[in-house]
Amino acid sequence: MFEQYLSLTHYDIFFFLKAIGMTLWITLVSITIGTLIGIVMGLIRCSKNRIVAAIPLIYIEPLRNSPLVTQLFLTYYGLPVVANIVLDAEAAAIITLSLNTGAFFSVLVHSAVKAIPKLQWEAGFALGHNRYSNFRNIIAPQVLRLLIPSAITLYINQLQVSSFVSLISLIDLTKAGHILTLRTMRPFLIYGIVFVLYFAISYPLSKLAQRLEKKVAFNF
């Protein structure tokens, strides 16, 4: 009954599920790579050498202060023109989202490290730790507690903006909604389903971020 009302075939439902898988795949891969990039860039930003600390800004600031869609178009359409590098839509999406995630995550890492009081460093040195051991055993666990809630919020945002990959013909959840809307001519129902699916993924993560944020605030 419901399937007939939506004019959806079993193939359409499978098509929708495959598109959900593509959205989750693109998001998970890009936030994983982006997190690694962000950790490296964020720690470099914490360097006491001002010149070294400023180097990541060459990468971070342009990506933080420009629309993701323009970054995506530059990667997918621009690279073949200026560098003769041709990427398929999936590769272009992962590269763009990874670099974008890395830029924002590096700011979170830098802010979290700088939020740790200097007394914590001094206490570690007083206990006989060298700089590396001090950071690994005393500073890093505190940074992680501060970082996790903000990181989850960033990941939710990256899941949502991943919908832009539909503009380069990658069949993600948003693109599937567009295709099925054209076939069924029921935009409200189809995009309602897309809305619910995004919400079903994002809302539990947002509640988790809120709980972790309260826990971190309580512990500090």
Image (cartoon, rainbow, N blue to C red):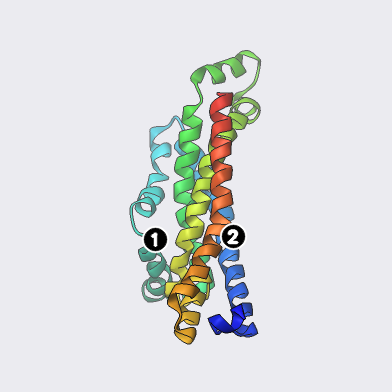
Instruction: Give the camera-side residue of 22 and 96.
Output: 22
**What residue appears at the point 55 percent right and 64 percent down from the top-left corner?**
197
The number of discs equals 2
Q: Is residue 88 visible?
A: no
Q: At which x and y percent is residue 170?
A: 50, 75
- Crowding at dot 1, Cα within 10 Å, few <14 / some 14-19 / many 20+, comes out as some
Quarter the N terminus occupies: bottom right
Above or below, comparing residue 180 to residue 216 in the picture: below
Q: Name which of mark 1 and mark 2 comes first in the sequence.
A: 2
Above or below, comparing residue 127 to residue 150 in the picture: above
* Residue farthest along the top direction in this orientation: 126
Quarter the C terminus occupies: top right
Q: Label 1 amino acid?
A: Leu
**Location of residue 136 (image quadrant):** top right
* Residue farthest along the front direction in this orientation: 1
Q: At which x and y percent is residue 111?
A: 45, 35
**Location of residue 67 (image quadrant):** bottom left
- Could you say which disc has been placed on residue 29 in the image? 2
Q: At which x and y percent is residue 65?
A: 33, 52
**What residue appears at the point 48 percent right and 63 percent down from the top-left corner?**
162
- Could you say which disc has been placed on residue 181 in the image? none
- Could you say which disc has been placed on residue 68 in the image? 1
**What residue appears at the point 44 percent right and 29 percent down from the top-left corner?**
48
Q: Is residue 73 visible?
A: yes
- Crowding at dot 2, Cα within 10 Å, few <14 / some 14-19 / many 20+, comes out as some
Instruction: Give the camera-side residue of 89 and 14.
Output: 14
Q: At which x and y percent is residue 83?
A: 40, 72
Question: Mark 1 falls on what kind of element?
Answer: helix
Q: Label 2 amino acid?
A: Val
Q: CA distance from mark 1 to mark 2?
A: 17 Å
